[in-house]
Image (cartoon, rainbow, N blue to C red):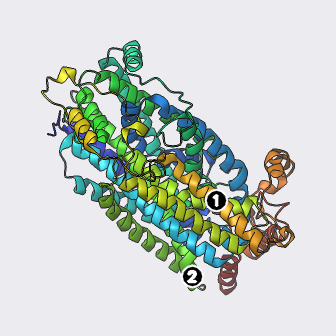
Amino acid sequence: MEQFVGTFHVGDYVVFALLFVVSSSIGVFFAIKDRKKGASKEFMVGGRQMSCGPVALSLTASFMSAVTVIGAPSDVYRYGASYVIFGVAYTFVVFLTAELFLPVFYRSGITSTYEYLELRFCKAVRVAATFIYIVQTILYTGVVVYAPALALNQVTGFDLWGSIYATGIVCTFYCTLGGLKAVVWTDAFQMVVMVVGFLTVLIQGASKAGGVASVWNASQAGGRLEVFDFDVDPLRRHTFWTLSVGGTFTWLGIYGVNQSTIQRCISCKTERHARWALYLNLLGLWIILFCAVMSGLIMYAFYSNCDPWTAGFVSAPDQVMPYFVMEILGAFPGLPGLFVACAFSGTLSTVAASINALATVMYEDFVSQCFKDLSNRAANWISKGLCVVFGVACTSMAVGASYMGGIVQAALSIHGICGGPMLGLFSLGILFPVTNIKGAAGGLTVGLALSFWAGVGSFIYPASSNNTHPLELNTAGCNLSITANETNQIVTSIITDRSWLVDSWYCMSYLYFSAVGFVGTVAAGLCITMLTGPTDPKTLKSGLTRSVREIICSEADFSQDKEDLTDFGKAWETGPGVQDNNYEEVMEEIERRFKNTNDNMSVNGYTNAAFDHNEMSQDRTKQTSL
């Protein structure tokens, strides 16, 4: 039985509608502002002139999505505050992304992350990786779209699928109109909405639960504060090791080599801006994580005597958070709408970033390879069309998300299964100069096979409560004769003994799927390389690999090359002939800088390759004709 504790008032609708209006307006603004800039690079990477602040907010908003707003508090509610250990994983992930992967991608002057794989290995490896990324992102985005639509359906009774389609339409609209600039600035706005929504729930929730001390005592009595479990058993769902080690591999696949992240980082003015964006983003991740964990604890303290899920008031654990919000905020018109706007903010930012990234890789890795003489205008319109196509695909995928179980585990399982092998592939290229093409292709195949085997098996044969360790939920205050929890215990007791494979390999923590794929890819890749003949590192182009020494000494090198931080866009402002409108001299200056960067990447590697040679040639032809 589903029980709605309240409905939206006029104020709720107004607050909720404002989110869509402002988000759409940002897309319209940049569409009008940049209407004369027809270059596809302007649409895809914002002209590579973004500042670190908006990019940092954008990164935080898109990856701390509705999965965090709704799913993370529910996870803490059921399993305890150990979820906070993800903060350790976030720290390692951001550091490795900023110091290991970002310098390679940024200095290469690429637009699609997977261009690197063709430079390092071959085109076939690039195409395979792009295809995997497209499938992974569409699957993940489907989960992210479904989560807030479920929240809206729970708290208002709105049609679930109508909410999903509205989300997809709005995201596609402003992403198609404004490109990456609209995505980044809309994310920044939506990040503010997420924080305000969380704070509203924290303040009112703590008050309703009897204060912070009461929340702490109730959480401690219910075992929710047992954070550090150092059990090394990989079958345990959440321990210190699964969250820190497994979480690092999972989130590094999302951050370190993911197109959506790297695309926004390379849109920054300089590599220093890109690094600062990542480190500022880490602060945002910690803040959102803290809010999510505290929301879960407050929610448990409030329902410590009558769990709505076990009592049957809601049909799924992920509905507890919106149910809780309506119960504590229902008497304040506008505040329930603020929470739903908070959940939708995370979704809009994630979906828009995914759509933009998918359109970029599809254009760069497929369309531009087949049609090499496209004009800037044609490329721009094709990119916009691809945004529409992927907007429809991601929205449609939400249908499948309704069958994936808990949204946190479903979302991270998808990233783990696909992200681990991809992380291993890029690591083979960057960290192991001896890796050859056969090793890369073979390693990716083995890694995917292992992670899919474990992931799909765990979906078919869910882990038992002996491994997941859900904490006790109480219904003594609900006055129910029989609870759903008791029914579940009866059903569980009927299940027969399962095979060793099911109770071991398939019961592995979902956070280790990425680690399995990574280790399988790297191990198999290196073995195949040794058997087929390693690559001579001296034959590789400069800048395609990165050693531990370079990571440690990166700051020293960075400070010595401050002269090289000026990006190509500065040539339009300070180059010779600008004041006299002599554009021919400007173009010569840009070509000179571009050539110097290609000839000596290790020295001028911090310069952002904002212009490609084909576009400069086209622009020069246009100026000559004028």
Task: Judge left or right: residue 21 versus residue 118.
Answer: left
Image point 84% across, 46% down: which residue?
A: 553
Q: Quick one: quadrant of the N terminus?
A: top left
Q: Which residue is mark 2?
A: 375
Image point 28% across, 35% down: which residue?
A: 320
Q: Secondary structure at mark 2?
A: loop
Image point 57% across, 58% down: which residue?
A: 517
Q: Position of residue 323 (x, y in %)?
A: 25, 35
Q: Quick one: quadrant of the C terminus?
A: bottom right
Q: Which residue is mark 1?
A: 424
Task: Judge left or right: residue 85 versus residue 172.
Answer: right
Label 2 amino acid? Ser
Q: Residue 248 versus residue 573: which sits nearer the camera? A: 248
Q: Which mark is residue 123?
A: none
Label 1 amino acid? Gly
* In the image, residue 534 above or below residue 69: below
Whether residue 257 can be seen here: no
Q: N-terminal of the two: label 1 or label 2?
A: 2
* In the image, residue 259 above or below residue 550: below
* In the image, residue 323 above or below residue 47: above
Q: Position of residue 158 (x, y in %)?
A: 19, 48
Q: Position of residue 138 (x, y in %)?
A: 42, 63
Q: Position of residue 232 (x, y in %)?
A: 57, 37
- Which picture quadrant has residue 598? bottom right
Image point 43% across, 68% down: which residue?
A: 387
Around disc 2, counting alpha carbons within 10 Å, would you say few (fewer than 14), some (14 to 19), or many (20 or more)? some
Q: Secondary structure at mark 1?
A: helix
